[in-house]
Image (spheres, rainbow, N blue to C red):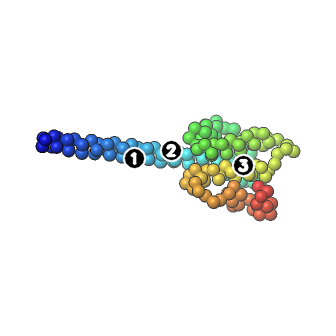
Amino acid sequence: MDWVDLLITPLAGAAVGFGVWYFQSRIDALRRAQERLHDERRKAYAGVLEPFIRVFAGLKNPKESQKAMAHMSSFEYRRTAFEFNLIGSDNVVKAFNNLMQYIFRFGQQDSAESDPKALMRLWGLFLLEIRRDVGEPNTKLGHTDMLRAMITDIDATGKEAI
């Protein structure tokens, strides 16, 4: 009986140690992969946001809006948007797609059906979903709060209006 105890105890310890090492290495690998994905998402989000930021930076300069629209039509931007669709979180991709569908539908024309407030609401929702995905999943901010720094008269239009 002593030889069984001498043999089973170290084998059981080795098996448990191997199991702990294996699961810890898998957890570490998953954590590193999540960190890389998080960094890649941030880069993709920044790339997709660039033309929108250009529009807001040059609201009084129509050439900036033209540059932004030209950038959105470029191969580089399309590649960034494609990568964004592959690695972005579901909610961020849905918010971006809703925004882009609105722009495709009403952005190319001065349509009586277009609604700047609807566009701003979609833009705010897109920014809010990015905020949630990159580190503030329980944010108490709303889509209007995301626009407050960009729209000078947001309070004059009424918080519910956007």
Task: Residue at 27% x, 41% y: name it.
Answer: 15
Q: Secondary structure at mark 3?
A: helix
Residue type, numbered disc 3: Leu
| Mark 2 lies on residue | 37
Q: Position of residue 12 (x, y in %)?
A: 24, 43
Rendering quarter of residue 145? bottom right
Residue mark closest to the camera, 1 vs 2: 1
Task: State which tag comes first along the sequence, 1 or 2.
Answer: 1
Instruction: Count residues near mark 1 (Cα–Cα under 10 Å), then give few for <14, some for 14-19, many for 20+.
Output: few
Seen as rendered, the residue at the extreme right is 112
Q: Give the CA separation, mark 1 to mark 3.
A: 37 Å
Task: Residue at 74% x, 45% y: name it.
Answer: 66
User: Is 151 positioned to the left or the right of 30 in the image?
Assistant: right
Residue type, numbered disc 1: Asp
| Mark 1 lies on residue | 28
Task: Give the label on residue 122, or none.
Answer: 3
Q: Secondary structure at mark 1?
A: helix
